[in-house]
């Protein structure tokens, strides 16, 4: 099928690349000249494992093309995926102006019937507004439009894997023909009719995914409901960690035992610095606002958000208790990205933490395998190194703020020798407290008894 994708962000590039991998003819477009130039030069505007290989292979086979001409992309696609950003407005509500702009372009450029698919995360009822906008903007232009909602469930860092091996595909439709077309689009993925480019064991074959057909409103709601529920789980685990700290229990033992109950499940119960990234914080806010505008008080979500905002304060308090005075102390920060395997620092807890440390007069040295360049744009004054050993040199304290595997695998004896004071505060519970004690560290983590 001829498919167009509008938006070159994580979602758009993964969607375009993977649909091309599945055998479709895909044309991607974006209105950001810098992103277009990067892609034209064979680069990637974002770091996402396996995406470079997928894009290179599908372009080589002639299945994937990029264009800066959005009109060309609209005219080419029988189905058009909207993958533009929906950031938060000041009050937390989703800003849908990019969707509105895209609707105008599609409506004015289309000459034939199109299936327009929302992949961007949007509040319920956006599909209805989009349908109206397409009709209004496209009056007398010759196109006709069906709208569908097909939310994405891609985790950054595992986007390619999640797209090609999904647990579920949700299609919110109003016409049978839209359902048929979306089934055709996903047929190769549902039937596994492609060579998976992700190497084992990164991507073990999962169960055959379920394609669930719903109304558009439900499909839109499913996305917000899922992300918000994940946020609730994380905040629950974080409050448990606080309780464990006070009562001398171990949050990992508690959550492992809880997770063995299939009604609870083991995932998203890792205590830490709280949820960050471009999705969970924004989606929780947008869901709260959506509920409010519908006259429903989503109090538990407000509480999950409040717990999340407190995480940095609580960790800072731990740092202050260990260091006593923060001013002029050399603090090594391992981890800038909001989670491992990405260069994304949007709403990354480490970024806020660094700002607070700098405000208190700390001298910060920072390390991350992928996110240094992006962080430099915010804090140009820091000492950066991709080498954790160099970062730890002469540190009065070392903070672990993103759980990269590289940090777990460090030679911690060597790290200790480099530091002025062997103090480690592990905000991701990455390391083993007993092993760190044996190595002579003063080691603190979250919700696990201190050594
Ligand atoms: C999230 C969802 O997991 C995806 O299903 C969804 O498609 C995506 O948002 C989206 O809306 O596009 P993502 O933002 O990539 O994916 O990251 P997650 O893996 O969900 O992690 C979010 C945050 O929660 C991270 O800061 C992570 O460190 C934190 N987290 C996660 C915890 O603190 N504890 C956990 O147990 C799990």
Image (cartoon, grey):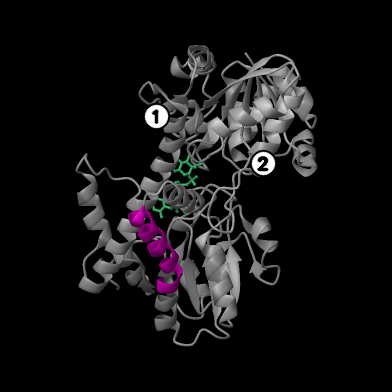
| Residue 246 % position (x, y) | 25, 73
Residue 403 visible = yes
Asked if 49 appears above or below 319 in the picture, the reply is: above
Q: Which-is-in-front pick, marks 2 and 1? A: 2
Q: Helix, strand or loop at disc 2?
A: helix
* Quadrant of the image occupied by residue 247: bottom left
Asked if 362 appears above or below 109 in the picture, the reply is: below
Give the residues in magenta.
Answer: 297-314
Is residue 328 rendered magenta in the image? no
| Residue 384 % position (x, y) | 65, 66
Asked if 204 appears above or below 269 in the picture, the reply is: above
Q: Residue at the location (78% across, 44% down)?
A: 34
How many C-alpha atoms fall within 10 Å of the one at disc 1: few (<14), some, or many (≥20)? some
| Residue 167 % position (x, y) | 39, 29
Is residue 299 rendered magenta in the image? yes
User: Along the horizontal axis of the image, is 238 left or right of 215?
Assistant: left
> To which residue does mark 2 refer?
98
> To which residue does mark 1 refer?
167
* Quadrant of the image occupied by residue 21: top right
Label 2, label 1: how far apart the Cα atoms are: 29 Å
Name the quadrant of the C terminus.
bottom left
Task: State the mark number for residue 241.
Answer: none
Predominant secondary structure, magenta span: helix
């Amino acid at each position: 099928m001829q498919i167009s994708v509008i938006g070159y962000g994580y979602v758009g590039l993964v969607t375009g690349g993977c649909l091309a991998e599945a055998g479709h003819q895909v044309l991607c477009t974006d209105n950001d000249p810098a992103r277009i130039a990067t892609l034209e030069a064979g680069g990637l505007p974002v770091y996402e494992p396996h995406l470079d290989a997928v894009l290179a292979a599908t372009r080589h086979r002639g299945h994937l093309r990029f264009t800066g001409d959005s009109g060309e992309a609209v005219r080419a696609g029988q189905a058009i995926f909207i993958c533009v950003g929906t950031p938060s407005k000041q009050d937390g509500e989703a800003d849908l102006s990019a969707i509105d702009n895209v609707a105008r372009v599609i409506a004015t450029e289309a000459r034939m019937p199109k299936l327009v698919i929302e992949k961007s995360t949007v509040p319920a009822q956006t599909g209805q507004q989009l349908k109206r906008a397409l009709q209004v903007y496209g009056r007398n232009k010759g196109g006709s439009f069906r709208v569908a909602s097909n939310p994405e469930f891609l985790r950054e860092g595992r986007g390619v894997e999640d797209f090609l091996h999904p647990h579920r595909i949700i299609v919110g439709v109003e016409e049978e023909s839209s359902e048929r077309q979306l089934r055709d689009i996903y047929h190769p993925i549902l039937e596994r009719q492609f060579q998976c480019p992700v190497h084992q064991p990164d991507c073990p074959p999962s169960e055959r995914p379920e394609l669930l057909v719903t109304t558009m409103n439900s499909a839109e709601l499913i996305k917000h409901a899922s992300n918000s529920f994940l946020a609730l789980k994380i905040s629950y685990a974080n409050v448990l960690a606080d309780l464990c700290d006070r009562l001398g229990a171990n949050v990992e033992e508690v959550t492992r035992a809880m997770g063995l109950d299939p009604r609870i499940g083991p995932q998203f119960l890792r205590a830490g610095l709280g949820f960050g990234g471009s999705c969970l914080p924004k989606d929780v806010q947008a869901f709260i606002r959506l509920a409010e505008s519908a006259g429903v008080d989503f109090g538990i979500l407000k509480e999950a958000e409040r717990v999340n905002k407190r995480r940095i304060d609580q960790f800072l308090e731990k740092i202050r208790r260990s260091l006593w005075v923060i001013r002029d102390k050399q603090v090594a920060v391992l981890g800038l990205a909001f989670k491992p395997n990405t260069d994304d620092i949007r709403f990354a807890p480490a970024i806020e933490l660094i700002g607070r440390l700098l405000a208190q007069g700390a001298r910060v040295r920072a390390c991350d395998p992928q996110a240094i360049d992006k962080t430099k744009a915010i804090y140009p004054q820091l000492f950066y190194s991709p080498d954790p050993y160099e970062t730890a040199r002469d540190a009065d304290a070392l903070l672990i703020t993103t759980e990269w595997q590289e940090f777990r695998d460090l030679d911690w004896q060597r790290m200790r020798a480099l530091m002025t004071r062997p103090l480690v505060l592990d905000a991701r519970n990455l390391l083993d407290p007993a092993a760190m004690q044996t190595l002579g560290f003063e080691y603190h983590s979250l919700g696990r008894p201190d050594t």
